[in-house]
């Protein structure tokens, strides 16, 4: 489905990003695994892809750093000649009640989740415009649609990603560049692994489908949006959430 495509996936060292990287590689894409914190985790994902016969490499870059984003994208373009798919998955949380939330924690989340997405799109867009093609997939969240107590910064950043997605989709549509967002619900990741079974059951009970989602289910939506099958879709937000946003 993605044979011959080049994909850059940010925050792909673990969780949803890692699963998207594996899925894209399985479908024939060469994947650039961006990470900021753990080189070991990112290289493990790359090694798994290569062992399965796919193509992958890692690239360290903090997407909150505009200059570093430009250097990453310019370097990747120089190495591969092009990038066909950009997945903005990198994100952080700094949860707390609004009255206790520090300005530093608010800014840190906004800088990575929203400005990081802006940085990569801005520097990638000039290449996509020259190519007259490209797929941009931004990771939002149900928290950006519904809001969530204790996550004012995270919810604001993910709501901002939705607005950014729609605006950029309008700007780039004339060059056949697709820009869409995915809003995952409660997905099984490292964070949920640390929770008690009782806590997970309580959360699952609040979801209409009565279960927690899997990273593979987000990756399959990303695969669809990265493929030619989504060529007539842009500016949309796809909630993959078991019905949380109904």
Image: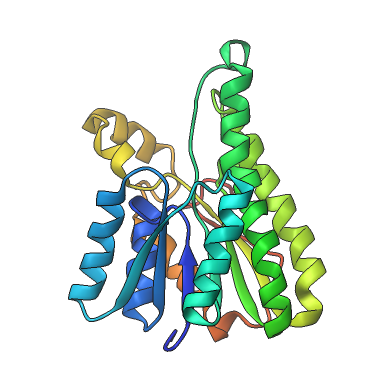
Q: Say which of 31 and 61 sits in front.
A: 61
Where, by quadrant of the figure, is residue 20 drawn?
bottom left
194 left or right of 227?
Answer: left
Q: Which of the pair 245/68 is nearer the observer?
A: 68
- Camera sees residue 225: no
Q: Which image quadrant for residue 23?
A: bottom left
Q: How is the image coloured?
A: rainbow
- On the rendered structure, is 118 left or right of 63? right
Q: Quadrant of the N terminus?
A: bottom left
Q: Going by the picture, which residue comes out furthest to the left?
A: 51
Residue 17 in sight in this render:
yes
Above or below, 125 against 15 in this view is: below
**Residue furthest toward the top?**
99
Q: Is residue 160 above or below residue 237?
A: above
Image x and y of residue 43, in percent = 27, 58
Q: Residue 115 location, x and y as percent? A: 65, 45
Relative horizontal placement of residue 156, taking residue 183 as reference (left or right): right
Residue sitting at 23 percent across and 74 percent down? 50
**Spot occupied by residue 156 in the image (x, y as percentages of width and height):** 66, 36
Q: How many marks?
A: 0
For the point 38% across and 48% down, which residue is it?
187
Residue at left offset 52%, top offset 81%: 227
Tell me where residue 160 appears, x and y as whole percent: 70, 44
Q: Residue at x 56, y 16 (%)?
A: 97
Quadrant of the rendered image containing residue 101: top right
């Amino acid at each position: 489905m993605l044979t011959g495509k080049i994909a850059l996936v940010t925050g792909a060292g673990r969780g949803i990003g890692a699963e998207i990287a594996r899925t894209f590689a399985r479908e024939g894409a060469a994947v650039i695994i961006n990470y900021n914190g753990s080189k070991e985790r990112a290289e493990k994902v790359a090694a798994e892809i290569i062992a399965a016969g796919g193509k992958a490499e890692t690239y360290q870059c903090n997407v909150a750093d505009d200059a570093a984003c430009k250097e990453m994208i310019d370097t990747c373009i120089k190495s591969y000649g092009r990038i066909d798919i950009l997945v903005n998955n990198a994100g952080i949380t700094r949860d707390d009640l609004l009255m206790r939330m520090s300005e530093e924690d608010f800014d840190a989340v906004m800088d990575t989740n929203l400005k990081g997405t802006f940085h990569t799109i801005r520097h990638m867009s000039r290449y996509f415009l020259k190519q007259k093609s490209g797929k941009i997939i931004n990771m939002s969240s149900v928290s950006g649609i519904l809001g969530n107590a204790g996550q004012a910064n995270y919810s604001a950043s993910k709501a901002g990603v939705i607005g950014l997605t729609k605006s950029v989709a309008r700007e780039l549509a004339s060059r056949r560049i697709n820009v869409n967002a995915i809003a995952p619900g409660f997905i099984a990741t490292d964070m949920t692994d640390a929770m008690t079974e009782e806590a997970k059951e309580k959360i699952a009970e609040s979801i209409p489908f009565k279960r927690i989602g899997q990273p593979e289910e987000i990756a399959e939506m990303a695969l669809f949006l990265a493929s030619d099958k989504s060529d007539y879709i842009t500016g949309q937000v796809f909630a993959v959430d078991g019905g949380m946003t109904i």
